[in-house]
Amino acid sequence: MTAVLYDARWIGNHGIGRFAGEVYRALPGLTPFDIKRRPFHPLDPWLLASTLRTLRPHLYFSPGYNPPVGWEGRFVFTLHDLNHLRVDDNSNSLKRAYYRYLIRPACHRAQFVLTVSEYSRSEIIQWSKASGDRVVNVGNGVGPPFSPEGAKYDPGFPYFLYVGSQKPHKNLHRLLQAYAQSGVSQDVGLVITGAPGKTLALEIQRLGLTRNVSFAVAKRNDELAELYRGAVALLFPSLYEGFGLPPLEAMACGTPVLTSNVCALPEIVGDAALQADPMSIDQIADGIRRLADDSTLRCALRGKGLLRSAHYTWEKTASRIAKILQAARQ
């Protein structure tokens, strides 16, 4: 019988994927469970339970939000946030049902539910009505290659950086409007990770920013670290985050950060970043201007950010998880 079966299918180049990969590397003794079916397949909770009945692990541990439905064994799963419930998107009706009928009961059946911030922990407890000692904040971390030392991305001009998806809650339309309003676009470009979606491309064209906004693909962490290091600052005015890895990674690279004053973001960045109301284009624009014009401010944020990010390590996260897994096996 496997002691702890780990759902390694979550490992990848995304938020949960980063957490999954770092935890797997930092925790010895995990047996990887990795099959071709994606963990976020709609039928995975039932298919997973069937597989677990065959494998019979002492404990199943998922770094993602897929609980096994119909399996009576011990399990620990990770609910990073309630994004699918909190973000106003009518297309999320099926996801809302998934949370209500699968994840909420699992919060009561699991030995423990892991999450990554006190903000998310409070939300999960309030929403699920699960016992407070069952929901545990293990945090996120940052480590190599995210550090000030190393190569820097150089497109031939100074640039602000946005890292993340183009989903509505990431607030890119207000970021672009604020960037246009700030008046600094002729001096400092804006680099966005990924490729431009149709809606975003149209918005850039409408605002007259076609020559000022460019895109960069970072398939590996070292490429992403180069983007952070080369930037004047990271702009991350998200409407909802259960943690927010890009601000932490930017700070670890010595890059100043402008982010939101809502959800988990103030908890993560503290006084080491500029904060703005993500609904206020004026506030975001003001922060952009300050970061473009004030080298003293950028220097101060760089120092504070390096100190702040040093408190978040994957070793600390792994140590917390190890204690939880030990308790869950007893």
Image (spheres, helix red, strand yellow):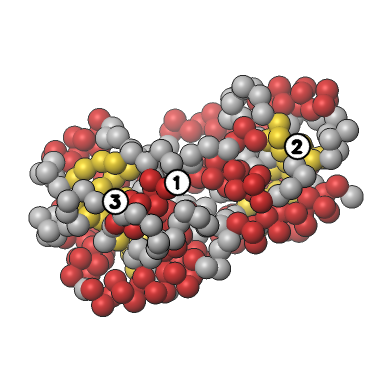
Of the numbered discs 2 and 3, the one sitting upstream in the chain is 2
Pointer 3: what residue?
Answer: 153
Res 148 quadrant in image: bottom left
Residue 282 seen from this side: no
Q: Position of residue 175 (x, y in %)?
A: 26, 52
Q: Which residue is mark 1?
A: 221
Residue neighbourhood size for the residue with mark 1, other residues' Cα within 10 Å, grouped as few (<14), some (14–19), many (≥20): some
Amino acid type assigned to the residue bearing label 1 in the image: Asn
**Mark 3 or 1, nearer chain start:** 3
The residue carrying mark 2 is 31
Q: Nearer the viewer, mark 2 or mark 3?
A: 3
Residue type highlighted by circle 2:
Thr
Circle 3: element type: loop
Question: Who comes first in sequence, dot 1 or dot 2?
Answer: 2
Q: Secondary structure at mark 2?
A: strand
Looking at the image, which residue is at 48% across and 70% down? Answer: 308
